[in-house]
Image: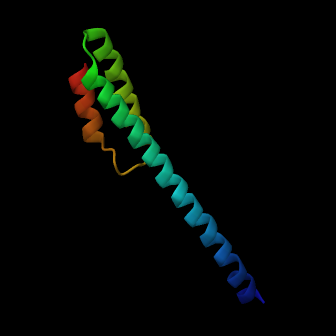
Amino acid sequence: MKKYIIMLILPVTLIFTIGCEDDEVDKCNDLTTTANEAQEAWTAATDSIATAAACVDVIAAFQAGLDAGCDQFSQDDLDDWEYYCN
């Protein structure tokens, strides 16, 4: 009986796991888009105030990506932006 219960629970668990992975991929894709947009705004900034504001946005976007555990973001990249912006 226990074997049959496990056989019923396993597919349900896999369905939820696969769904969570898709959500994580979507979240990381959204964070990557946000980071790219922030970098584009930084590139387009024409004065020091706009550049400083864009730096804050880029750093926040990279930190969010790191916090979410997305592979597209690294601590080294974040450190580089923090060094450059400060």
Closer to the camera in the image, 41 or 27: 41
Tell me: residue 14, above or below residue 79: below
> Residue 81 at what x, y percent from top left?
26, 29
> Residue 73 at what x, y percent from top left?
33, 44
Q: Is residue 68 visible?
A: no
> Residue at image x 43%, y 41%?
31
The answer to whether residue 64 is left or right of residue 77 is: right
Tell me: residue 82, above or below residue 32: above
Instruction: Tell me the quarter of the image containing the N terminus.
Output: bottom right
Closer to the camera in the image, 13 or 41: 41
The answer to whether residue 26 is left or right of residue 60 is: right
> Residue 14 at what x, y percent from top left?
60, 72
Tell me: residue 14, above or below residue 19: below
Instruction: Tell me the quarter of the image containing the C terminus.
Output: top left
> Residue at image x 68%, y 84%?
7
> Residue at image x 57%, y 58%?
20
Color theme of the render:
rainbow
Instruction: Report which quarter residue 16 is drawn in.
Output: bottom right
Closer to the camera in the image, 45 or 53: 45
Total number of numbered discs in the rendering = 0
Instruction: Report which quarter residue 4 is drawn in.
Output: bottom right
Instruction: Report which quarter residue 83 is drawn in.
Output: top left
Q: Is residue 11 visible?
A: yes
> Residue 71 at what x, y percent from top left?
36, 51
